[in-house]
Amino acid sequence: MFNDSEGRLPFTKKSSELRACNTSDFKRIYDATMALLFKISYRVVNDEEAAEDLAHDSLMKMHEKELVFPSIDDAKYWLIRVVKNASLNYAKRKGREKKAYEKALHEDTRKAESGETELLKAEAQSKIKEALNKLPENLKMILILREYAELNYKEIGRVLGITEGNVKVRVFRAREQLSRIIGEDDVYLS
Amino acid sequence: MSTCPEFDLYSVYLDHEMPESLKNDFTEHLEKCPECSRHFSRFKNIQTALRSNSQTITLSKAQTEESFKKLCIVMNYKAVTKKAQPDLLIKTLKIVSPALAAVMVFAFILPLRLLHSPDVQQNFLTPNTNASASLINNRGIIVDNSLSAVLSNSRNFQQISSLDFSNSSISSIDIFKPALSNDSITIQIKLSGIHDILPKTSSGLYEAAFAGGSGAQF
């Protein structure tokens, strides 16, 4: 057996440590994060294929860099940060094109056929989605991380590199602005 | 109403980020105060709407597996294909050749352009195939091709015969010997065909005096 410079066996690692270049670790990270990454990316870019590609890109980047994470959560935060930035860049590049994609989604068409309450809910959802897109980038992102990725303040702070206090303020501002955009007249939301 | 908490606390309460000690007080207040309760329910509705929207964006187990296969294919493709590295010689040439060109420009072309009068230089560097004679700033004549061809044209001859040599400067035509220290200098130039138009002297040479003691013989 060959030992490396630090005298450790080359393939030994701490039990909780995750290596991106290790196949089983990579699969573990993939299973734990793919759905989440897809969701975050999708909410930003509004395109299934692009969201999947962006999530894949972040995972590939992690693999290429041969990163080592102390825990699965650390891997998750790193990946969310990468996919968030990539998605925002993608959305900026696509600009107005994304609106056309949004119309072609099944999530809207499926709900149109259900009952009245469901219809109201669907309307409320599309309304809130539109309102979310109108928010400034930093506030929109913080709400996506809070409500879609369901991260707590501490986790959001770690992903965005800001303090918990700052997260608290931003979440509040985002909700307030969103509420203002939706308007007082919305029966279901207000 | 003065006891109502700050609005940002609704958000903190909603996210279950409020310390336990404040939580009970806040819940009690919400039950009593209709204004705060209205504000809070608005925030709560927004959260519900966003969360239920979030539920619609899902990847099923099968989709996730399918997606993983796709990812593996892309990663394998990337692992076996690499951007071709260009040959070392070509790479070096690509870097060196522009530098060499720049050195040539600085070493040969720029000194010529900077040190000498542009009028004269232009005539030497770009020879004219047509026979012609021209006056350069009243300092001298540049004659291309054979003189007889030039002088056969009467208009050209008239122009040349009326030239004023008083302000001529010898340095304007001397490119290769810029440092002339003597006051007086003699230049002998043989011109074929000059005898066709000017009366012959016994020596066969024509003299002209330049200002500043310089002299020229033809």
Image: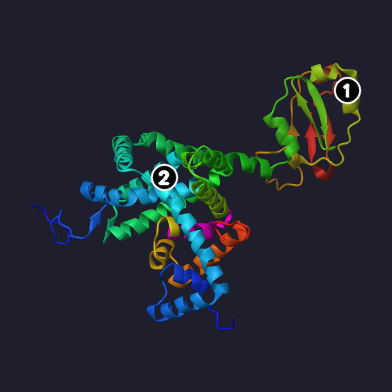
Residue A79 appears in view: yes
B64 relative position to B160: left or right: left
B127 relative position to B24: left or right: right
Q: Residue shown at 74%/25% (left/top)?
A: B190
**Label 1 crowd (10 A; few <14 / some 14-19 / many >=20):** some
Viewer-side label of 2, 1: 2
Circle 1 sits in a helix, a strand or a loop, which is it? helix
* Circle count: 2
Q: Is residue B32 magenta?
A: no
Place residue A152 in its image quadrant. Answer: bottom left
Q: Which mark is residue B157?
A: 1
Q: Residue shown at 51%/37% (left/top)?
A: A104
Q: Amino acid at mark 1?
A: Phe
Query: What residue is shown with label 2?
Result: A54
The stretch of residues the image draws in magenta is: A134-146
In depth, the one of B121 and B93 nearer the eye is B93
In depth, the one of A169 and B122 nearer the eye is A169
Q: Position of residue B92 (x, y in %)?
A: 41, 38
Q: Position of residue A94 (x, y in %)?
A: 54, 42
B65 relative position to B98: left or right: left
In depth, the one of A65 and B3 nearer the eye is B3
Q: Residue shown at 56%/51% (left/top)?
A: A127
Dominant SS type (magenta): helix
Furthest residue to the front? A116
Q: Up-down: is A41 above or below B93?
A: below
Place residue A137 in its image quadrant. Answer: bottom right
Q: Up-down: is B28 above or below A75?
A: below
Alpha carbon distance from label 2 to label 1 = 83 Å
Q: Position of residue B109 (x, y in %)?
A: 61, 39
Q: Up-down: is A107 above or below B158?
A: below
Q: Position of residue A102 (x, y in %)?
A: 53, 41
